[in-house]
């Protein structure tokens, strides 16, 4: 350490080599090294540019399978550890793509590693100077929705694709009249010939204008503008010009660099969908953890970010989901530095229904959440409007300490939802 | 099938459910489905938009570990299969990001799957209409290099980072004088404060201008322009305006959408580096295979694409590398359709040295390859120029059927290289 700004990357490293050796291989490959000593690689150059192993904490053995192609000396023991490596910022400068070349470039292919996962990133403030991050975040989203408190309640248009636009109009009207805060396109619904974005924008904003004129409150609709980048920018302009108040992008599908590029041009909150994150996260001994990934997505400008919800239909445990929600709520930089919050709204989605409200509130202890129920609203036996009422009542009960079954006794929509989707968990 | 254009995705699916069931879960999640039946999901809508399981071929059991969070009914047997699913193109249109939402979106997170890997993609010609693909490819690169035949020979600037620009000048001069075809920045070397791209472009093009004036042949230097997108475009312009003839981008770090965006603006061959591809490819039961990934990168416009080389220092076997090289050489669309070739030059890199030439030539049976030796040239005991001579002689011998040891008897640089880096493999 010599006072120069550094990026500190934390990895899970698994190896049949001593962890110190494995860590040095990563540091070498990702900074000054190649497989043989080369001319012009002076001691001074290494001193200034070599990545540095900061800490190694040995962990109990894991049951993660070995990655293929590994070096495994006969009789060697498999070790797992949390390894921190510091990279001088001057090696690449405060650029997301160039940062990734160093902290995540070739290292997943190293034969010395039986497991390698980027867990977390500690970034210097130079990144804050280049990347403004969320433009609206929690506060800005609440202002647009005129919901200063309470959980924000949303849904996804279902069926995901194929819904004729005039059916979409009726659905949006019904949901808006039921008092929903937020509606989003499915991530599968881009700008296809059978339902052009321009048509969806036209009918949806017309309906939302009407409800806003009548009630004074305008639900937010996140139009999926994911597309090739110039088209995405044009999609954004289309939404903005029509008076839309939110755009959705699939962060991994446009890329972090694509998101940062959009952020520079964007005038609306960016709803960050996490489609394809499973490729990075699901193999426990490989990839990029949500904690590290979400920091990059927030830096690039995501106002909302999908974390999954409790009891979701996907692979993650409740503990993983809670860790993701917490991650999104942490300041991105040293909390003492002004503007370090990079306030992003966690989006709880997948398999969400009213019965999950008490436990979700108890375990997150916040209402700064956007809770999306797709099937949990559209699948309500009395229709989507009853689904919204059930969700709203459930969250109101949870946050005011009212027992959900008590509330259900006087709210038929909630009673019906609990019967259909399941009663509260203990 | 009803004559409408479709995308056919091929997956490795592993599951404790019947493969037919697992395949239907993927098709449902990635098109019209949610976790409960919803209003407005009519039979007609499903008929038109539901993805369709085309084929299931059961495979022998694998030793891939189970992904976490899976559904495993008691006593159920683990099955592996190759599954083909067809998606109507109208579900998303010919857009790379929106295609990915369907064929790779949430499916990696499904609990029904103990393993899930996207192996290949069969794309309709509508994609060729939107994406022009490689602008130079093999032919254009050969023309720029004035090398109508023979393997193309290159190297990487080493040390990767930290080399003062005046040292870079000397290195480039030495390599150019030794007759190298191609030199590239390391993927770690972007536009950092210690070695600004503008400075590198200035000294390198000055040296290459001199060698071109003297010999009539100008080696190609791939400047790493990877950066935030607007900066990347400016980097491209800087290289072009200085008379540079190639740009390097890390495809995964700018994203496929970022690459397609660059392609629209780019006037130079795009050297596609594969940093971070290991995240997609290394877990055998998860991710996106190089075969599928490379198709997307070629569609987005990569003129050159890294495949690794035989005996590389990373995890892949020779068989995997050969499969990757073959993949890059295949036409991207129906070979009968005009312009379907999407000719991309395979780049063999990592641990390459002269001794590998005979086997590489025998197993690829082509010289339409760009072979990069980093350490194998810079680490030559007699310096980089001797390293170039050794590589050139080795490849000349291999392609003319001369025994390498015979050639080494009259070429001291090759003799020394074989002694240092290893003799030819049987």
Image (cartoon, coloured by chain):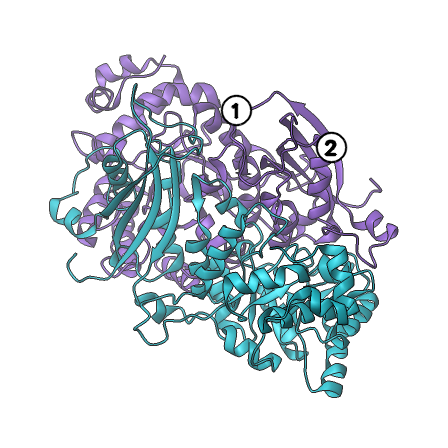
Chain colours: A purple, B cyan
Query: Marks 2/1: CA distance?
Result: 21 Å
Residue nearer the viewer, B328 or B302 = B328
Under tag 2, what secondary structure? helix
Residue nearer the viewer, B262 or B367 = B367
Q: Does residue A399 lie above or below B161 as drawn? A: above
Q: Does residue B8 lie above or below B388 as drawn? A: above
Residue designated by label 2: A20
**Residue at x-position 39% and y-position 67%:** B331
Q: Does residue A310 lie above or below B117 as drawn? A: above
| Chain letter of disc 1 in the image | A
In the displayed orientation, state which residue is furthest to the left: B43
Residue nearer the viewer, A42 or A385 = A42
Q: Which mark is residue B376?
A: none
Q: Is residue B184 visible?
A: no
Residue designated by label 1: A63
Q: How many marks?
A: 2
**Callout 2 environment at 10 Å: few (<14), some (14 to 19), or many (20+)?**
few
User: Mark 2 vs mark 1: which is more N-terminal?
Assistant: 2
**Residue at x-position 27% and y-position 55%:** A200
Q: Position of residue B205 (x, y in %)?
A: 72, 77
**Residue at x-position 58% and y-position 53%:** B275
- The image quadrant of residue A286 is top right
Under tag 1, what secondary structure? loop
| Chain letter of disc 2 in the image | A
């Amino acid at each position: 350490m010599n006072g120069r700004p550094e990026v500190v990357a934390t990895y899970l490293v698994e190896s049949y080599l001593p962890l110190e050796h494995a860590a040095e291989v990563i540091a070498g490959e990702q900074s000054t090294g190649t497989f043989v000593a080369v001319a012009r690689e002076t001691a001074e150059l290494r001193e200034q540019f070599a990545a540095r192993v900061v800490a190694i904490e040995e962990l109990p053995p894991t049951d993660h399978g070995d990655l293929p192609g590994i070096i495994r000396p006969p009789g060697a023991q498999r070790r797992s550890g949390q390894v921190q490596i510091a990279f001088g910022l001057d090696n690449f400068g405060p650029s997301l793509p160039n940062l990734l070349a160093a902290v995540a470039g070739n290292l997943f292919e190293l034969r010395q590693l039986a497991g390698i996962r980027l867990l977390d990133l500690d970034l210097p403030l130079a990144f804050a100077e280049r990347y403004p991050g969320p433009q609206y975040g929690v506060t800005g989203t609440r202002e647009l929705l005129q919901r200063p408190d309470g959980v924000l309640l949303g849904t996804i248009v279902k069926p995901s694709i194929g819904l004729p636009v005039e059916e979409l109009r009726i659905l949006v009207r019904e949901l808006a009249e039921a008092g929903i805060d937020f509606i989003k396109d499915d991530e599968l619904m881009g700008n296809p010939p059978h339902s052009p974005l321009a048509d969806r924008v036209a009918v949806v904003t017309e309906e939302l204008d009407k409800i806003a004129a009548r009630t004074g409150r305008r639900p937010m609709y996140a139009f999926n503008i994911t597309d090739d980048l110039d088209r995405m920018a044009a999609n954004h302009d289309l939404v903005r010009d029509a008076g839309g108040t939110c755009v959705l992008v699939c962060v991994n599908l446009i890329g972090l660099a694509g998101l940062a590029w959009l952020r520079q041009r964007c005038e609306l909150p960016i709803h960050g969908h996490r489609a394809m994150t499973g490729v990075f996260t699901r193999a426990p001994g490989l990839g990029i953890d949500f904690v590290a990934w979400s920091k990059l997505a927030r830096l690039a400008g995501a106002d909302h970010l999908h974390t999954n919800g409790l009891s979701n239909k996907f692979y993650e445990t409740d503990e993983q989901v809670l860790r993701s929600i917490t991650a999104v709520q942490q300041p991105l930089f040293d909390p003492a530095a002004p503007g370090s919050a990079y306030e992003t709204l966690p989006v709880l989605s997948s398999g969400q229904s009213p019965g999950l409200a008490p436990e979700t509130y108890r375990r997150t202890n916040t209402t700064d959440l956007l809770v999306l129920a797709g099937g949990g609203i559209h699948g309500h036996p009395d229709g989507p409007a009853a689904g919204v009422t059930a969700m709203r009542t459930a969250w109101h009960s949870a946050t005011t300490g009212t027992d959900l079954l008590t509330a259900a006794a006087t709210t038929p929509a909630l009673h019906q939802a609990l019967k259909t989707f399941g009663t509260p968990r203990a």
